[in-house]
Image (cartoon, rainbow, N blue to C red):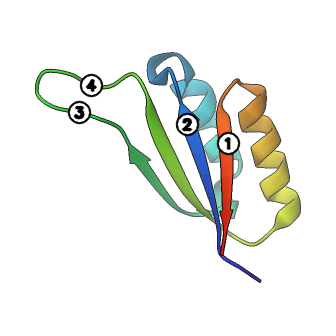
Amino acid sequence: MGQKIMGIYVNNRIEKTIELQKLLSKYGCSIRTRIGLHDASEEICSPAGVILLDLVDNSEEIEKLKADVTSIGLNVQMMIF
């Protein structure tokens, strides 16, 4: 049993945020920790970012989440330790 981290690259945060938030809520019981990273300052807020999810070790749910996130046009990468 390893640690599973999902990275989601969101290339258009404004356009994809609502759909992605619905999916993250749907699979909320499979997510231990969620971290969002994007460039931000007083002058600019980047339209792209990365979300890191620390996942509960449930392979079936993780595959469903991955498929759903991919279906809305986002890039998903997995890290397993």
Residue 32, above or below 27: below
Report the residue marked by disc 3. Answer: 40
Q: Position of residue 69 (x, y in %)?
A: 71, 36
Q: Residue at x 50, y 46 (%)?
A: 51
Q: Say which quarter of the image contains residue 47.
A: top left
Q: Earlier in the sequence, mark 2 or mark 3?
A: 2
Residue 45 is marked as 4
Amino acid type, residue under disc 4 in the picture: Cys
- What number of labels is visible? 4
Q: Quadrant of the C terminus?
A: bottom right
Report the residue marked by disc 1. Answer: 76
Q: Are marks 1 and 4 in contact (CB under 8 Å)?
A: no
Element type where label 2 sits in the image: strand
Q: Are marks 1 and 2 in contact (CB under 8 Å)?
A: yes
Amino acid type, residue under disc 1 in the picture: Val
Q: Earlier in the sequence, mark 3 or mark 1?
A: 3
Q: CA distance from mark 1 to mark 2?
A: 7 Å
Q: Residues within 10 Å of mark 4 (few under 14, many from 20)?
A: few
